[in-house]
Image (cartoon, rainbow, N blue to C red):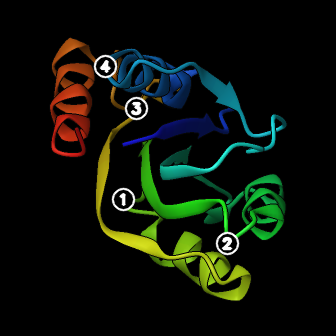
Amino acid sequence: MTYAVRYFTKTGNTKRLAEAMAKELGVEALPIRESVTEKVDYLFLGNSYYAFNIDPEVKKFVASLDKNKVGKLVNFGSAAMLNSTYKKVKAEADKAGVTMDRKEFHCKGEFKGIHKGRPNRDDVAAAVEFVKQYK
C-alpha cells in the first residue's frame, strides 16, 4: 500500500495529528500547498471547520486532486465546536471524482480555551491506531 498525508491547519492541532499518522505510515505529513504528484492508495486529508465550513483552501486542494492518482481519500481532523467535516469534504471529492473512504478520524481540538490541551496524547494515540487499519 502507498500513502500520502496532507493537512490544513490554522492552530496546529490538525498538524499534530497528521505528523503522528504519517510517522506510523512511514511518510511525511505535508501541508495542502504540496500537491499529490505520486500515485497513492490512500490520501489522508486533515482539516477542520472554520466559520462553520471547511476552508476554501481545502476545497481548492480537493478539486486539484487527480482521480487517477488517488485511490481513496480518508478524512481526519479536530475541531472545538463542530464534529466531522466528512460531508463537506465528500461533497468536494464527489465533484472531483475522487472516492472517499467511509471511515474517518475526528477528535476535539482546542480553540480559544475550549477543550484546553486537545488534541491530547490520547487523541494522538487514537489517530495512530486509526491509520493502522490501512496497513
Q: Is residue 112 above or below residue 120?
A: below
Mark 1 neighbour class, 10 Å CA radius: few under 14, some 14 to 19, many 20 or more: some
Which badge, 3 or 4, is on the more N-terminal residue?
A: 4
**Marks 3/4: CA distance?**
28 Å
- Mark before the other along the chain sequence, 2 or 4: 4
At a point 75% along the width and 40% down the height, the residue shown is: 32
Among the two numbered marks 2 and 3 on one chain, the one whose residue lies closer to the N terminus: 2
Kindly state the secondary structure of the residue where label 2 is placed.
Answer: loop
Circle nearer the N terminus (2, 1)? 2
* Residue 19 location (% of width, % of height): 47, 18
- Spatial CA span between label 2 and label 4: 25 Å
Check residue 6 in the rendering and tell me which mark sits there, or answer none.
none
Say whether residue 6 is left or right of residue 81. right
Q: Amino acid at mark 2?
A: Lys
Q: Is residue 121 above or below residue 132?
A: above
Q: Label 1: state its secondary structure.
A: loop
The circle drawn on residue 83 is 1
The answer to whether 40 appears left or right of 109 in the picture is: right
Disc 4 target residue: 24
Per the image, the residue denoted by label 3 is 114
Residue identifier under label 2: 67
Residue neighbourhood size for the residue with mark 4, other residues' Cα within 10 Å, grouped as few (<14), some (14–19), many (≥20): some
**Circle 3 crowding by C-alpha within 10 Å: few under 14, some 14–19, many from 20:** few
Residue drawn where x is 66% and y is 60% of the image: 69
Residues at marks 1 and 4, CA–CA distance in whole angstroms: 24 Å
Q: Position of residue 57 (x, y in %)?
A: 82, 53
- Could one spot residue 11 in this view of the protein? no
Q: Residue at x 17, y 30 (%)?
A: 126
